[in-house]
Image (cartoon, helix red, strand yellow):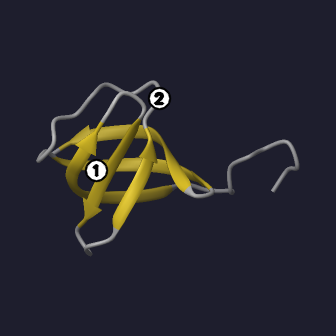
Amino acid sequence: MDDLDRFEPGVHNFSGIVRVWAASTAEVVTDSGLVVFLDTRGQQPVAPGTRISIETRKYRPCHFVTKVMVR
């Protein structure tokens, strides 16, 4: 990892149900039951209960959302 890049290399993909989606953060319960904490700055809001797939980049302790697909 580049010292100036705060993100870990590569992307992570998750699918699941939105539990909470606020102005800049969200929580998604994945299909495997894991709760993923997200940084959603720059993304359109998604209603709680919506099933989505997301592409993220990880930085500790959460994931930055780079793409959202409502399913």
Residue type at mark 1 is Ser
Where, by quadrant of the figure, is residue 32 drawn?
A: bottom left
SS for callout 2: loop
Q: Is 70 above or below relative to 2?
A: above
Residue 30 - label: none
**Around disc 1, counting alpha carbons within 10 Å, would you say few (fewer than 14), some (14 to 19), or many (20 or more)?**
some
The percent position of residue 14, horizontal first and vertical second, equals 35, 59
Which kind of residue does numbered mark 2 sit on? Arg
**N-term-proximal mark, 2 vs 1:** 2
Tell me residue 29's x, y (percent): 26, 61
Residue depicted at x 42% and y 31% = 24
Tell me the residue at 28%/38% (across/down).
Answer: 21
- Provide the residue designation for mark 2: 41
Q: How many marks?
A: 2
| Residue lying farthest to the left in this orientation | 49
The residue pinned by badge 1 equals 53
**Quarter of image, res 37:** bottom left
